[in-house]
Image: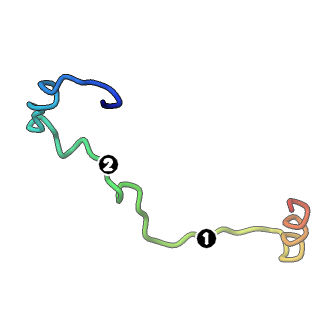
Amino acid sequence: MGFGSYDESEQKDQDAGDVDDNDGVSVHENTHDGDISFESDASQDELLDQLDEMK
């Protein structure tokens, strides 16, 4: 006795020939190499105080 029944004919003839390789997910699509920089008028102490407030 099984957990359910299914029609084996539905399982038999699955054709994977219609699969397009371009439909897959590219894991490198949003890969970025480089540097980031920013400038701020705030001093290091001011930035640390803001960080403490956020915590």
Find residue 21 and report its horizontal and vertical position in percent.
18, 46
Q: Hey, which quadrant is residue 36 in on the image?
A: bottom right
Q: Can you identify the residue that label 1 sits on?
A: 37
Image quadrant for the C terminus? bottom right
Find residue 5 and report its horizontal and vertical position in percent.
27, 24
Q: Is residue 18 above or below residue 42?
A: above
Q: Is residue 23 left or right of residue 20?
A: right
Q: Residue at x 52, y 72 (%)?
A: 35
| Amino acid carrying mark 1 in the image | Ser
Q: In front of the other: label 2 or label 1?
A: 2
Instruction: Report crowding for label 1: few under 14, some 14 to 19, many 20 or more residues within 10 A (C-alpha).
Output: few
Find residue 28 and report its horizontal and vertical position in percent.
35, 59
Q: Residue at x 27, y 46 (%)?
A: 24
Q: Residue at x 21, y 44 (%)?
A: 22
Q: Is residue 27 left or right of residue 17?
A: right
Q: CA distance from mark 2 to mark 1?
A: 30 Å
> What SS does tag 2 mark?
loop
Q: Residue at x 8, y 31 (%)?
A: 13
- Labels 2 and 1: the sequence-earlier one: 2
Q: Nearer the viewer, residue 3 or 41?
A: 3
Find residue 23 and report its horizontal and vertical position in percent.
24, 41
Colour scheme of the picture: rainbow
Instruction: Report crowding for label 2: few under 14, some 14 to 19, many 20 or more residues within 10 A (C-alpha).
Output: few
| Amino acid carrying mark 2 in the image | Val
Image quadrant for the N terminus? top left
Q: Is residue 41 left or right of residue 9?
A: right
Q: Hey, which quadrant is residue 38 in on the image?
A: bottom right
Q: Nearer the viewer, residue 13 or 29?
A: 13
Q: Is residue 36 above or below residue 16?
A: below
Please give the label number shown on residue 25.
Answer: 2
